[in-house]
Amino acid sequence: MLSAYARFIVRHSYFFLFIIVVISTLLTVIPLVCHNIPSFSEPILGFETRGTNLAHRFIAWENLIDETRPSRKLAVNPKEIEDQIRMNQSYYNKIRKDKSRSGRKHPKKQHHKRKKNNSNIFATTLYSSPEINTTVDHVHWSYGKNVSIEDENAVFLKNHTRKQWKSLKNMQRIPDYHPNYASGVCGAPATDYAHLVVTSTDNSSMLSFENVEKVCQLQSLLIEKDEEDFNRLCQRSAHSEEMCCPIWSVPNYIALISGKDSCENLTRDDVKNVVNILRKCAGYFHNFTLMASCELDRCRVPKYCSQYDAVYNLLFYIIDSDAFAPPTFSETFVKNVMIFLPLPTSSTVLPYYIKLQDSNLSYDTLIIPAMELGLKNTLFDLWVIEDTWLIGLGGFFVFLCVWIYTKSILLTILLFTAIAYSLGVAYFLYVYVFNLEFFPFMNLLVIVVVIGIGADDAFLYVKVWKMVSKQLIRDNVVVDDNGLTDIKNVSSAGETILVQILEETLKHSVLAIFITSLTTAVAFFASYVSYIPAINCFSVFAGTAVLVNFFLMVSWLPVSVFIIDVKLCNNRLLILSTISKSIYEFGGNVKVILNRFIITCILRLHSCFVVILGAIGVCSIIIVFYYPGLHLPDSKHFQLFQTSHPFEQYDIYYRDKFIFERFGRDIGIGSRMPLRWIWGIKPVDNGNHMDPFSKGKLIFDDDFSISNPKSQTWLLEFCAKIKGQTFYQPTLGPLLPNCFIESFKMFMSRRCIDKIDKINRTPCCESSQFPYTKEVFDFCIIKAMESLYQTPRELFIPGVAGPKFIRSTYPPRVVAIVVEFESVVPYSMSYTAMDEFFNKVENWTKQELENAPPGMTCGWFLSDLQFYDLQKTLASGTLMALLLSAALGFIVLIPSTFSIIVSLCALLAMIFSSTVTIAILVLNDWKLNILESVAISTSAGLAVDFSLHYALSFTNASGTKSSRVKFAISTSAGPTAAAALTTGFAGIFLLRSNLLPYSQIGTFLALIMSVSWIYATFFLCSILNIFGRNSVKEAPTEERKSVSRVSSICSAVPNLESHELEHLADSNRTNITHSHSPSSISATTVVLHDDFENSLNKIEKKTSVELNID
């Protein structure tokens, strides 16, 4: 088959290359033109679990909530169904009546401004308003006197009021906008505004007069950085569309409290006075007496605490929570303060941030270490494309390596064209064959891997091609006066030799390329066992790209090399030839020295290497699997940028230091875990698990029946049992919807005849006894829920609990119910705490459902456990993928080496390579997040490559075990080092990226290449030198006679690589037999000494060379 393939390439090389180009181009262009270009505006999309037991419940729950929206399948209030039917009928009648006017344009909608979180304002009038005296006087005297604080506080209040009165009388309106204008016309700050953290480098308090002055100047500089964009984007004052809202900061609030028109006019006494006010009012703030909008006299606090709501806003928004904290409230040292800019936290402020980033975010001793502008996803989407230049830089390094080796710029360009085609074709298969729409940003990292693999394959193929062609020419062509020593001279002699050269090259390179590609692809495909869509998609794209690259390397590469070396003239510049020859001579000498050094070290110190590297490997296993172990993520926040970036600094270090951030979360540390039980809905996720947008459809449980009397009794008992469990949290106040059967029973206990309206409520009254018949339940539950939703909001706030009615039937029918309570367990990022909570409630639920009637047996429990499920999936899925990758690597080793001992030794080296790499990452504080999981799970598959090369070289050598080790080292040490160098450096260039995923994958690639080469070279060869066996196999005489010298070329590889100085023989002769396995060339991916002819001449002159290492 190879012979026919080689003959086809020789006869139709241009046509074959044209066909490959056309097919590859079409497959690459089609998805780029006919399919949407991937967007990375939501980088954490797909970082969730799909397919797990809990994930099925989460999706079913989301679908249930989604279906209870208006105009969907379900309703929580039956009256909504009647109203919807009536509205639809009215709308239909109106459409028919106004059909003739249906084409009229609608008036343009007015743009509404976004409402603030707090509706309170600093002052309702401007400073020049004549009503301001009356307002201040009224607020003061309506408070009255409190004799309990008449002493010190009364004196302080009197003096404070006198100062306020004098400053307000003399205050003038400022006509033009000033960044330090102390006004409250825009209300309180909010999380929707851009905010920046300011701290001091000299460890001084931010409430010191000097730092207050500096902050005043710093906030002016923040506007001057890009005044045009700032004025264009800023929030406008309610009193003037031309004036931006003032900045919310410590200096401006101090100026406001002190009656100054600008923070530039503050004095040292003003600052001390405000610090004193904060200390006096901190107690009211922390016991929730001082709240927002206290200026409207809603809070029983001193006037100086509530004026302008300044104290509340300072303690809640501006000053970190460590200052003025209970129990003493006397800590006046403020480490960090916040500056709120009147800019929205959205992508619209990106131009302002870019100019801000280019400047120095500091003023004197003040720095801005962190900020929140709402730009993380937008900036990531921008940088994920911009930082691809680092991938290109790594590719350029590999490009130079290939160019130096092949000495052909055209061949190098064709190789990288094939690599680009492999990515394009893989994307075509990804989109149209695998039908995957979701393309996570991690897929871009496949570029680095494919570039490294493609270069290694090119090194291998070109090396074998040169060796085979020159050896066959020497054997079959007589050198005449014209010097037929180049392969281009052979083409005129006929195609027989060319076919034989190509066939032998393919025979000794295709299998080697296939094994290396297979092990890498298997490592990626093994990650498909994960339940995380982003990892699944990455594994499919990466594995597919590697396999497509293999097919192009055995089709595109052979025909490209053939055309360039045979069909085209290859005239090189003299200067390039001289430089190339010098580089090869130097590289050859270095290689000889390194080979000799490695062989000497291993033969003499093999026991030390086994003990030392083995001990390190055992310690790494302990570190990875016992202590400290793989750290699970302890934050829902997924880090996108380097830790030093201001956005990440805010999320990691500063967010929790301010009270408004802790109170503004929907669920966070300290919140109670909800307890939810659902019946009527099957916990099934029937969407596409590879697409985060595909949530599937709601599946109803046809066996569910709450109207059955037994089901009613059991549910009532179930709710009573919940309240007796240790995980139940008693809650004050009425719980009308939480377990609806209880409130429904109360509803049914009312009198049948209303005394006032004389309405007969039968059968929905006390005449019906619990449990109710199916007919009574179905009829009265509608009345009960309509009545419940008419309850005042002080007693009932609609939530997710209660029965759900299907809209498609009339009268409405209950198809699902939700029972909800609160647990005593606080929300935690701790995997252990959440695992204990889930297992406890889940096991209790299963036990109760065993005794449930037939219509209630399919209920299930749910809580806010999404992060816990992600942690659990990462822990188990990563380990499973790692073991699967190692097992598949071992499966590849067995048929390749045909030796259990060699395979086990290689497996041990592979395991140690993987665990040492992971241990280094663990000690470097890597958390087991999404990207880290991919790296760890593929480490075994990537580490087995080098061990495979050494094992194959050892297996195919004969003689004593020492001589076989020499052969393996001479054959594979240099090539594997070059392979590690090219891939490792491609990863090292990524370390300069602003994006954490890029730098992490770069770190991993550089680390796994280095560690796996060290263990494959020093540990595996040393252990083979101890436990390996002698081999005296020799090819049969008849077979040796029939084999041409072309077939024995690979046996000469070590002689050629070592400049015939490191022959694989010790004091007695070592015979190396020919094998069709890729043992001696599978990893030969480095440059041989260029002066091949001289090497052959030397070998012919020295028929036998013996080297005694000892």
Image (cartoon, rainbow, N blue to C red):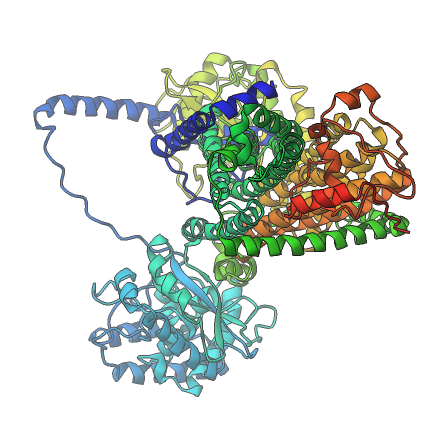
Q: Image height check: is 797 above or below 250? A: above
Question: Where's residue 168, x and y in %?
Answer: 28, 80
Q: Image height check: is 617 above or below 361? A: above
Residue at 32 percent across and 68 percent down: it is: 226
- What is the residue that sits farthest to the left in this orientation? 100
* Picture mark count: 0
* Residue 838 found in image quarter: top right
Question: Where's residue 855, x and y in %?
Answer: 57, 16
> Is residue 846 something that shows in the picture?
yes
Question: Where's residue 924, x and y in %?
Answer: 68, 55
> Is residue 726 something that shows in the picture?
no
Residue at 61 percent across and 56 percent down: it is: 582
Question: Where's residue 533, x and y in %?
Answer: 53, 34
Of 812 and 1047, which appears nearest the observer?
A: 1047
Q: Image height check: is 554 above or below 290? A: above
Question: What quarter of the picture does the N terminus occupy?
Answer: top right
* Residue 136 found in image quarter: bottom left
In the rendered structure, the answer to whether residue 899 lies left or right of residue 153 reads: right
- What is the residue that sits farthest to the front in this orientation? 481
Of 861 and 38, which appears nearest the observer?
A: 38
In the rendered structure, the answer to whether residue 1017 lies left or right of residue 312 reads: right
